[in-house]
Amino acid sequence: METRTTRLGLWVWAILVFLWLWIPLAIMGVYAFNSSNIQSWPIPGFTTKWFSEAWNDQEVRDALWLSLRAGLLATVVALILGSLASFGLARTKFFGRDSVSFLFVLPIALPGIITGLSLNSFFVIWGVSFTLWTIVIGHATFCVVIVYNNVLARLRRTSGSFFEASADLGATGFQTFGYVTLPVIRTALVAGGLLAFALSWDEIVVTYFTAGAQNTLPLLLFGFIRQGQNLPIVNAIALVVILVSLIPVALAQRLTNDPGAGRG
């Protein structure tokens, strides 16, 4: 059994890790309301003008729209491909199945710069122009993994007798999918889709190599910081990006922790 000292030590350690993760983000959030365009501490006052200036900047709005489109399309692609892959590997047994599963998961384990460079070389060699779809392809390489893992884990926790009973009762494959499979995996699909969108929304490394001259919101922020320009606007936009990212992550965590999710 854990002693009181051990529990106290674990609590202290957890609090220190929490502060280490969140204090820099909190400071940046405070700077987003800084009334001065010079980042100094303590800040001289509070204002919300930087949010309106960011919204009225056409470059920022274009980057926001591109990020939203890329995230949504990458999520759709990930839901389709990730689900199909998980169905194939969960329902069948064949030699090398574990190796195939490993290859599906590998892209998210690789450094983003490796994936980005590989895709960039592929597009250049084949003369593919950098457009929204090259960004979507880049993001889908790791978004597929999120959906695949979520759906596969749900299918493995679900008894195969459900699907066998459906077939014994004369249901077609489509009927089984609609009445049995989909209710079982729906929360896993939603959670996987939300996490995939969150990853795509703030992705920068792979995007840098697949966007060409286009700017998603993270790329635009990166450019502002490199040039030392519009730092108050950068803080305001970054705070919005963090808040938007928290929503799908929180929803996905709630769905995956739902005790009734596995019952369909």
Image (cartoon, grey):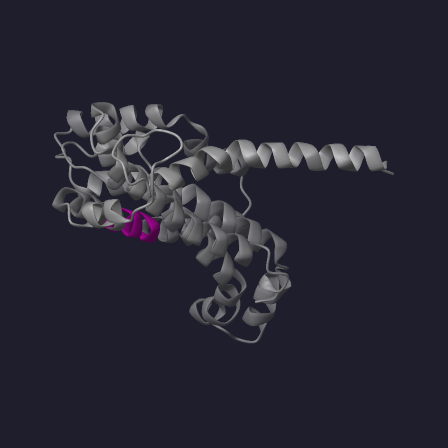
Q: Is residue 183 above or below residue 247?
A: below
Q: Residue furthest front?
A: 44
User: Which residue is drawn at the image coordinates 28% and 41% (left, top)?
Assistant: 35
User: Which residue is drawn at the image coordinates 36% and 43% (left, top)?
Assistant: 239
User: Residue 91's x, y, as percent?
Assistant: 53, 52
Q: Is residue 74 magenta?
A: yes
**Residue 190 placement: quadrant:** bottom left
User: Residue 173's x, y, as percent?
Assistant: 45, 66
Question: Does residue 59 appear left or right of residue 69 in this picture?
Answer: left
Which quarter shows the C terminus?
bottom right
Which quarter shows the N terminus?
top right
User: Residue 56's x, y, as percent?
Assistant: 15, 49
Q: Is residue 209 above or below residue 256?
A: above
Q: Is residue 148 magenta?
A: no
Query: Taken as a whole, is the magenta stretch helix, strand or loop?
Result: helix
Q: Which residues are magenta?
A: 69-76
Q: Is residue 263 above or below residue 130?
A: below
User: Which residue is drawn at the image coordinates 16% and 25% (left, top)?
Assistant: 125
How many numbered callouts? 0
**Residue 144 placement: quadrant:** top left
User: Which residue is drawn at the image coordinates 43% and 53% (left, top)?
Assistant: 247
User: Residue 8's x, y, as percent?
Assistant: 76, 36
Instruction: Using the rendered image of the protein, determine whether residue 138 is visible from the camera's viewpoint.
Output: yes
Instruction: Using the rendered image of the protein, determine whether residue 95 is visible from the camera's viewpoint.
Output: no
